[in-house]
Image (tube, grey):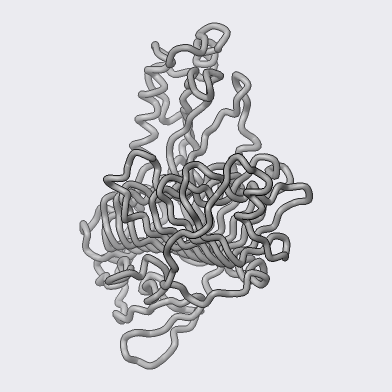
């Protein structure tokens, strides 16, 4: 499992698509043949560069550099060496659920029987599901939870090898740690094998609720997510069945940043074909944990076919610039991009939005709580657009106030929003590190 290779311990700092050597050699690291695991987040590149910055496992010695090709090897590498700096190179597509959902079934769980037992015509909508099949579902879900979650320790870099490496169906838990980098990975969102039917949800009409985010940043500081592709992949929501009149929801978030996490940069990623994308803060009642934290920068990401939450923000000072948002025809009636939540301080500028004909521009913003935001120099279909003014005109019952109350300073080069679709389209996502 372990690859032991001697490395010149030269850490590089990456700004956009240029890698600058910091060890005094005076040379520039070239894209071809360079060691992505040794690269660190550049000074000034978003909130993740605050303070000591984000270096991940770049300082790892040869004993703590691993190349993995299976989920078991990947989890073992994460556990080895504790919090010592480590680099984990993922080679090929690693499947966390290679044996299928059947491997997790416990207690006689059977979906068809579950559907019979909790059919609203039989069970009603005035009480939670309970009984043998719900107990069996819970036990089966616990088996999946243990199998597909992987805990990422402090001082770790996880990097994909080449253009087609990543993780299928795993949930990466960056929880209660510090200093983590993830780059050049294709991440297929985990599929919840055992969603829960809640008869009382959605105003007592019931709904399916799923677990498992692809990446969870929880109570963690200094994280850099760069040049990854996040997607539902083989299991798009459009192909999920409908039971009790509701979509059998088997996906949760792609990248959630929650519970006092701080100093995160999300750059040059591709998010595609997913519903609920990214929460920054996951509860209105968490001021004691989240206030003054949840500082996140998102730049040069492409969001294509994402229905909502790109991001939805509570509490944090969140800087969102030079991203490209592409809304599809079948999403235009029920989408939003920026969710304005309690005590949020969202600064969204210099972004490009591509909307289909007939889509409401005002829906790009959604108000959840009273919190001013800054939204300036954003372009919709190539035209400069005041998103707040349009929102307030189209949705007068949810008036938004302008002025987030702070100005971002930790930014790399800000590109013209007119150029962003071309720049991000060619460079964002796994396999595009240049």
423 w.r.t. 10: above or below? above
Left of 285 or right of it: where is 110?
Answer: right
Q: Is residue 34 visible in the rendered structure shown here?
A: yes
Residue at the spot x=36%, y=24% of the render?
Answer: 139
Kindly give the residue lying farthest to the bottom in the view shown.
26
Question: Quadrant location of residue 171?
Answer: top left
**Rendered residue at 33%/68% (across/down):** 54
* Image x and y of residue 260, in percent: 31, 50
Total numbered badges shown on the rendered structure: 0
Q: Nearer the viewer, residue 19 or 303?
A: 303
Front residue of 187 and 428? 428
* Residue 158 appears in the picture as rendered: no
Q: Is residue 120 shown left or right of residue 319?
A: right
How far across and down, in percent of the image, does residue 294 sit? 36, 55
Q: Residue furthest top?
A: 122
Q: Residue at x 75, y 51 (%)?
A: 356
Looking at the image, is 366 positioned above or below residue 21? above
The image shows residue 226 at horizontal and vertical percentages of 46, 64
Picture quarter with the N terminus: bottom left
Which quadrant of the view contains residue 59? Answer: bottom left
* Residue 218: percent from left, percent from top: 33, 49
Front-lying residue, 252 or 365 = 365
Q: Is residue 115 above or below residue 428?
A: above
315, above or below 85, in the image? above
């Amino acid at each position: 499992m372990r690859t032991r290779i001697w490395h010149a311990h030269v850490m590089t700092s990456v700004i956009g698509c240029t890698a600058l050597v910091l060890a005094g050699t005076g040379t520039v690291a070239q894209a071809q043949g360079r060691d992505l695991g040794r690269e660190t987040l550049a000074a000034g590149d978003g909130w993740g560069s605050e303070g000591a910055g984000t270096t991940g496992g770049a300082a790892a010695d040869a004993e703590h550099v691993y190349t993995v090709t299976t989920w078991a090897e990947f989890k073992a590498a994460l556990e080895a060496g504790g919090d010592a700096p480590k680099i984990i190179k993922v080679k090929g597509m690693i499947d966390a659920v290679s044996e299928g959902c059947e491997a997790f079934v416990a207690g006689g769980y059977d979906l068809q029987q579950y559907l019979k037992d909790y059919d609203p015509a039989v069970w009603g909508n005035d009480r939670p599901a309970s009984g043998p099949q719900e107990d069996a579902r819970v036990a089966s879900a616990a088996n999946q939870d243990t199998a597909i979650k992987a805990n990422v320790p402090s001082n770790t870099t996880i990097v994909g090898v080449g253009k087609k490496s990543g993780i299928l169906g795993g949930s990466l838990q960056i929880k209660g740690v510090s200093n983590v980098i993830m780059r050049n990975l294709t991440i297929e969102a985990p599929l919840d094998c055992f969603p829960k039917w809640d008869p009382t949800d959605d105003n007592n009409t019931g709904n399916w609720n799923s677990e498992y985010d692809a990446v969870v940043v929880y109570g963690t500081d200094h994280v850099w997510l760069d040049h990854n592709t996040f997607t539902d992949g083989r299991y798009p929501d459009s192909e999920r069945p409908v039971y009790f009149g509701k979509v059998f929801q088997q996906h949760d978030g792609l990248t959630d940043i929650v519970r006092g996490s701080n100093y995160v940069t999300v750059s040059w990623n591709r998010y595609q074909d997913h519903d609920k994308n990214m929460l920054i803060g996951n509860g209105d009642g968490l001021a004691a944990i989240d206030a003054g934290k949840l500082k996140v920068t998102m730049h040069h990401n492409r969001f294509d076919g994402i229905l909502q939450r790109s991001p939805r923000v509570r509490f944090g000072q969140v800087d969102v610039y030079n991203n490209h948002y592409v809304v599809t025809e079948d999403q235009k009636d029920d989408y939003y991009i920026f969710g304005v939540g309690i005590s949020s301080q969202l600064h969204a500028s210099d972004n490009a939005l591509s909307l289909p004909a007939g889509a409401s521009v005002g829906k790009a913003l959604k108000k959840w709580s009273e919190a001013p935001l800054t939204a300036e120099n954003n372009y919709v279909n190539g035209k400069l657009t005041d998103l707040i003014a349009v929102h307030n005109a189209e949705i007068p019952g949810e008036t938004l106030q302008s002025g987030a109350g702070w100005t971002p300073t930790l930014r790399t080069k800000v590109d013209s929003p007119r150029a962003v679709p071309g720049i991000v389209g060619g460079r964002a996502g796994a396999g595009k590190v240049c």
